[in-house]
Image (cartoon, grey):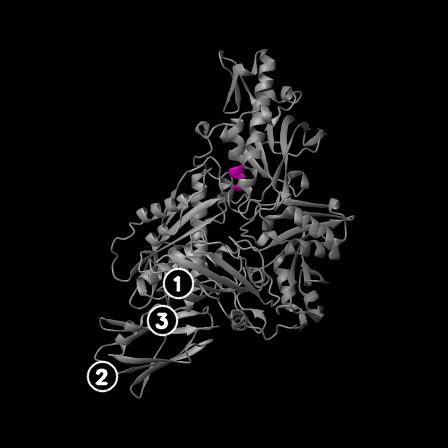
Amino acid sequence: MENNTSQSRRRFIFGTALTLGGIVSGFAFSNKALAELIVFKDEKKILGFAPSVWVEITKDNFVVVTVARSEIGQGIKTTFAMIVAEELDADWSKVIAVNSQGDPKYGDQSTGGSTSVRMFWTNLRQAGAQARQMMINAAAQIWGISPDDCYTENSYVYERNGTRKLAYGELIETAMNLPVPPLNSVKLKSSSEFKILGKSQKNLEEPNYVTGKTIYSFDFRYPGMKYAVLLRCPYIGGSVKSFDATDALKQNGVIGVYQIEEGIAVVADNSWAALKGREALKVQWNEGPNANLNTEQIYETFRSLIVNTGQLPSKTVKEIDVRFEVPFLAHSTMEPMCAFANFKDGKCEIFAGTQNPQYAREDVARALKISKDNVTVNVLNSGGGFGRRLNSDYITIAAKISKASGLPILFFYTKADDIKFDYYRPASVHAIKAGIDSNGKPTGMIHIIASQGGVWPVDPPYNVGGYNYELKSSAFGIREGAWRSVENTQNIFAIESAIDELAYLAGKDPFEFRLEITTDQKLKNVLSKVAQNANWGSSLPSGWGRGIAAFVGYGAYITHVVEVYVSNEGFLNVKKIYAVVDPGFPINPENIRNQIQGAAIDALSTALYAEITIEGGQVQQSGFHNYRWLRMDEIPEFDIEILRTSDNPSGMGEVGFPSVTPALCNAIFNATGIRIRKLPISRTPLTSVEKQLTKDNYFEVNAFPNPFESSVKIEITPRSVLNKKLDVEIYDYLGKKVIEPKFKYDSAKYFADVNFEILPPSVYYVVVSFGAERFSFPIMKVK
């Protein structure tokens, strides 16, 4: 809903400041509140102040909540507005949420780690309650009665024993002249009094999303604005040696070419001209120290760091000693990185989607060598973040190009740029040794993590008989950064998979085993509930499997059960995901459901498909064709239950991811007997030895080479004369046909040379059919 600001009006603005005391001391909240009067006439400010704004009440009875955290699709604008509106007793249909600028007056503005709601919950409630009390006090003064004889509802103050009422908008001038009630004088609502919180509310942004009115960085326009792209060295750790811009400057629409620290910028009248100009650049690169680096070298280095996993206690009678490997991952947000910058007269104004506007402000100031007081960062909605927009590289690049060119610049990454020059989720190798005693109880767990140094351990939520970890590192200069749920995406995969292996070692049901080894009642509750919802323990058809896993973090508890079907050919089909989440107090259940489902889709995508690989010192992925994400027709059915066990909320943005991957891998084991210890799963054939032997009764299938890089020769030799038509097709491991090769027949065998160049690295299946018989043979593309 939009508010008309063209009319002369008065606005009551009320706010509180919030600061972060630090990691050790925790959160420190300011006890100060501020109310200001701002008068507008024909869009011209007549009287105004610069308050620490949280809540604004307009004369036409709208409530505007300024949100100091970034909207990146997680619904934080709606959530913050709900918290304020509840305590304010506001009319929800007249509540608006807007982005703040990057400014210390708003306190900590970093959006990440699922901290926003947990950090601002009490503060925003207090702001709403204080503003409500000021409305009551203003009405009481006008009517000449006690504030105790007034009550509020839907943005009105009512006389308790009378018929009079006043809209909040009618009270703002009186309220401005009243003292702000101290925090200890206002009473927050009990959860039983909530009318907005705890109930599903539509996202305030949805109408603008679906009508295209939401302004993202790519949508921003400014008079005289030009477009810019950057040609960066494709080699990790490389740099520009020399370049020739002659042909680029000849391109129609190209204005200029500028070298900055990060690469060579092309500025043009439009985005197409900028891209064509970049294509025309002639560059020689300093390839740097990583010109021969490849993914396998990185993994091999990490593996070599793990020499000895140590000894478990003497009471251990059985043990596992296993390795798990997880790849680098790009964020690959739907909206690639993009920012507008205008450097003029020693000042710079930014418009961009960012998860940390104050850091962006400081980074721009350092890059341009100006005071941060001369940098303004205006926060736009982001088309996804997942930690990527905590880095402000794209914003400082825009600022540098604007300064170099003297023009207002919209700088953008293409999808290929965005993937190739990301701050990746770290790759890592995990060694886990764990054991059980004669009663099947855990005796200890040793966890060694090898990475570039960016992966930290996570304590298991179970009594494993003692958890010890060790960190090993070797750096390759590959950029890394925060990625949705950070180290939990890796540690929980390894730990929950190992817990499943311990259960199997002990001869116990994986669900029952987890119940036995935890004393945390909340964890027991979500485990029991998800098992009940999934009908755990009931029989499944042949080829089906169930897996379970849990995660505790960000103040929340969650468990997942995943059901899969693996066909005789080895095709994987994720059928259904059950989730039970305990967020404490569910502020907006529908938004929580969206978060859990969206996180699960991310988890499935990265478990099944996604990885960043390096060859010859260069990132190989450049788009969704070779950095796969789940398609709509691949989304499984969801069953999500939300519990309420507290009056305080937890974080949600990260919670739904970590336990999906191990639950999926445990389900595959349940269906096939094959353990998945290396991600993505597409690297592991899901056909058993028994199924492979069956085909030999009819024909012999060979592939040369196998594994292969771009093409493979397939030969099929019948063991007897075939009296039926032979059909051969190639499928991906989810059962989608990707190639129908044309086979030739010569000397009693069928053969074909098959080109896989456009397909991503993965297991593929050569499916041979004749009559009613159908068999598969796995082949592996490795690059």
Observer able to see residue 208: yes
Magenta stretch, overall SS: helix
| Numbered disc 2: secondary structure | loop
Q: Residue at x 50, y 59 (%)?
A: 468
Q: CA distance from mark 3 to mark 1?
A: 41 Å
In contact (CB < 8 Å): disc 3 and disc 2: no
Q: Nearer the viewer, residue 626 or 212?
A: 626
Badge 3 marks a residue whose secondary structure is strand
The x and y percentages for residue 97 are 56, 36
Q: Which mark is residue 721?
A: 2
Disc 1 residue type (three-letter): Thr
Q: Quadrant of residue 287?
A: bottom right
Residue 14 rendering spot, x and y as whole percentages:
63, 29
Q: For mark 1, what is the residue?
A: 316
Q: Give yes or no for residue 78 being in the magenta stretch.
A: yes
Which of the two labelled residues, at mark 3 and mark 2, occupies the earlier sequence position?
2
**Hey, what amino acid is under mark 2?**
Val
Q: Position of residue 744 (x, y in %)?
A: 34, 82
Q: Nearer the viewer, residue 31 or 603?
A: 31
Residue furthest front in the image = 314
